[in-house]
Image: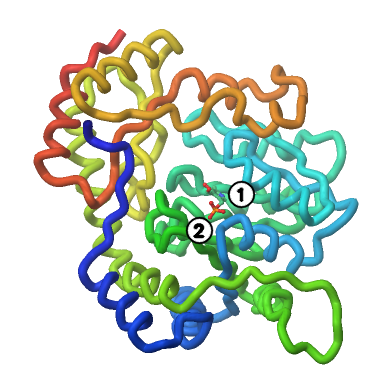
């Protein structure tokens, strides 16, 4: 069975981690600072704080921007429960918003129609599809760009993360670059990142205020830096797999919008089918052909369902959980595996 996801840990990534392990300094140190500097260089300024996960990065970004108890924070309902966790741990109130049917990102029209204002929005670049940050900024005073699935992606020539008030990244095992678990927050003014670094440095402080150990380690940072340096090559490989699948795609099977856009960092290749029955039939069809396809988000994972809100207010997300299917898309796929997926896709039944 071709796995739905497999990390690509290159020889140079192993060498980078091994050098740190052999150095005797495995705690946070020069590699963690180096990773932060890499991101600052990438964005051409600002500040960065590396941390233990994307969830920690979300929490630090929210707190670093001054959001806390009483703040209403919009979240796209078709996304990861990590968003709810981060908002709740700040004492703030998550406000789920429906997503667009075409690219699965937060619907700016639905955000604008909320009956009460929000203090901020977390805009997820869903499976690599860029959320429309300028449009969301028209309603949300602060926007955090969630780039956990899209580091290196671009929108209108700008790197994703550059247009909001802060950007967060995840280095979890299934993400574009990974060290198993890790995260980072970046912001243009550097204020949120400075707050986050202070919050993370709990040890040997002269004055006590509650802080928290959100550290990552130097060998993790070394692995991430090694992959970050290859981001363009990773993007090119992912885009070439997308092109092969697009050639094979039968008429009548839809896709998440923008998969072949020039600046896209494709995280997932998501089919959009006409019905749940068709999606479930294709799931079995791919499994029988030796390819592990997955349902990207199950209905019970929708954030509005976790919060027991009326599902009829989120029709697009409710439709997407019934009609989407994700195929293996990652640089560790061999050419032969890519062909196997593509040939199976070419023969898939369209309605
Ligand atoms: C969009 C999004 N935001 C945040 C997270 C949280 O990242 P992590 O798993 O590193 O805590 C994830 C992944 O799980 C994610 O997909």
Residue contact between numbered discs 2 and 1, judged by CB atoms under 8 Å: no
Q: Residue furthest bottom?
A: 206
**Above or below — where is 298 with respect to 153?**
above
How many residues crowd around disc 1 within 10 Å: few (fewer than 14), some, or many (20 or more)?
Answer: many
**Above or below — where is 244 with respect to 285?**
below
Comparing labels 2 and 1, the label whose residue is closer to the camera: 2
Image point (58%, 63%), residue name: 167
Report the disc number at residue 170.
2
Residue 186: quadrant of the picture: bottom right
Give whichever of discs 2 and 1 has the lower sequence position. 1
Image point (52%, 60%), residue name: 169
**Above or below — where is 327 with respect to 228?**
above
Camera-nearest residue between 31 and 273: 31
Left or right: residue 116 compared with residue 179 = right
Residue 48: quadrant of the picture: bottom right
Report the disc number at residue 172.
none
Left or right: residue 141 compared with residue 46 = right
Using the rendered image of the protein, determine whether residue 51 is visible from the camera's viewpoint.
yes
Disc 2 secondary structure class: strand
The quarter of the image holding the N terminus is top left
Left or right: residue 322 compared with residue 177 = right
Q: Does ligand 1 reach within 8 Å of label 2's beta carbon?
A: yes
Image coordinates of residue 160 in percent, x first then y, are 49, 59
Image point (43%, 27%), residue name: 295
Q: Residue furthest right?
A: 70
Image coordinates of residue 109 in percent, x first then y, are 67, 35
Image coordinates of residue 219 in percent, x first then y, are 41, 75
Image coordinates of residue 347 in percent, x first then y, are 16, 17
**Above or below — where is 62 with respect to 246?**
below
Residue wearing tag 1: 123
Disc 1 secondary structure class: strand
């Amino acid at each position: 069975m071709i796995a739905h996801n497999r990390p690509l840990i290159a020889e140079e990534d192993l060498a980078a981690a091994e050098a740190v392990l052999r150095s005797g300094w495995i705690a946070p140190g020069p590699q963690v600072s180096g990773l932060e500097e890499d991101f600052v260089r990438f964005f051409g300024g600002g500040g960065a704080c590396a941390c233990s996960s994307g969830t920690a990065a979300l929490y630090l970004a929210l707190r670093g921007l001054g959001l806390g108890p009483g703040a209403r924070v919009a979240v796209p309902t078709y996304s990861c429960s990590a968003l709810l966790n981060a908002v709740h741990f700040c004492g703030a109130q998550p406000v789920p918003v429906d997503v667009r049917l075409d690219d699965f990102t937060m619907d700016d029209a639905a955000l604008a129609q909320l009956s009460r204002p929000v203090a901020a929005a977390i805009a997820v670049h869903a499976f690599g599809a860029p959320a429309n940050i300028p449009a969301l900024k028209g309603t949300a005073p602060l926007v955090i760009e969630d780039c956990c699935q899209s580091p290196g992606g671009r929108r209108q020539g700008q790197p994703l993360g550059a247009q909001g008030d802060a950007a967060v990244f995840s280095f979890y095992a299934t993400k574009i670059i990974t060290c198993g678990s890790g995260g980072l927050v970046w912001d243009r003014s550097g204020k949120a990142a400075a707050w986050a670094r202070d919050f993370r440095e709990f040890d040997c402080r002269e004055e006590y205020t509650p802080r928290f150990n959100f550290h990552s380690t130097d060998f993790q940072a070394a692995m991430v830096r090694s992959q970050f340096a290859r981001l363009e090559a990773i993007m090119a490989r992912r885009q070439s797999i997308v092109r092969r699948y697009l050639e094979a795609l039968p008429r009548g099977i839809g896709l998440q919008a923008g998969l072949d856009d020039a600046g896209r960092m494709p995280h997932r290749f998501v089919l959009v089918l006409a019905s749940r029955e068709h999606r479930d039939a294709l799931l079995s069809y791919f499994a029988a052909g030796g390819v592990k396809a997955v349902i990207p988000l199950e209905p019970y994972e929708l954030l509005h369902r976790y919060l027991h809100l009326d599902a009829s207010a989120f029709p697009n997300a409710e439709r997407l959980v019934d009609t989407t299917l994700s195929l293996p898309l990652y640089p560790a796929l061999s050419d032969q595996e890519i062909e196997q997926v593509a040939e199976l896709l070419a023969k898939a039944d369209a309605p």
